[in-house]
Image (tube, rainbow, N blue to C red):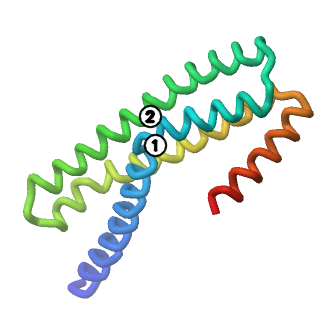
Amino acid sequence: MKKIIPVLMAIFLSVNLAVVAKTNDITNKFQPKCKEKKEFIQQLDERLNFTPEQKEILKQNRKKNRKEMEKIVKEMEKLHNEIKSIYLSTDNKLEADIKSSTKKMQLVLLKQEADNLRKKHREEFLKILTPQQKAELEKFKKEMQLKAK
């Protein structure tokens, strides 16, 4: 029995460390990149030559999508702050790991929800495009990938 407790604690700690690493990745992804996004959207608008109807649909979709994503991001920030306060309120790291483990799992689930939402938004975007615009989008993506390297 005495041997089981240290083994269980080691397993619990390793899982928690993995969740903490994942949490740090999540929060780093949500740093503001507004300037880059605006430039990207502007280039995309120019390259795909959207019709006025498409522009209006895209504008409405972006507004709706932003609201949906903001809810998730705010919840993620709230959880991250709660986790931080747990670690700051105690000197015992193990105790803090135990107390914050549920919140860390919630954070991972919210990240998955945000990824699913992005996928849904991407699909909505593609439905609006004509076949020519889809082909131009693929060219644009390849150019951007080459630029990034």
**Whether residue 94 is situated above or below residue 77 in the rendered picture:** below
**Whether residue 54 is situated above or below residue 90 in the rendered picture:** above
User: Please, what is the three-letter code of the amino acid marked with disc 1?
Assistant: Leu
**Residue 72 occupies quadrant:** top left
> If the image is split into quadrants, where does the N terminus sit?
bottom left
Q: Nearer the viewer, residue 147 or 100?
A: 147
- From the image, tell me which residue sits under label 1: 110
Q: Check the image and name the residue furthest to the bottom.
A: 3
Q: Is residue 138 left or right of residue 27?
A: right
Q: Nearer the viewer, residue 27 or 149?
A: 149
User: Please, what is the three-letter code of the amino acid marked with disc 2?
Assistant: Ile
Label 1 vs 2, first from the N-terminus? 2
> Residue 112 at what x, y percent from top left?
53, 47
> Residue 66 at what x, y percent from top left?
52, 26
Secondary element type, mark 2: helix
**Whether residue 98 is situated above or below residue 26 in the rendered picture:** below
- From the image, tell me which residue sits under label 2: 72
The residues bearing labels 1 and 2 have C-alpha atoms spaced at a distance of 7 Å
**Residue 129 occupies quadrant:** top right
> Residue 93 at what x, y percent from top left?
16, 66
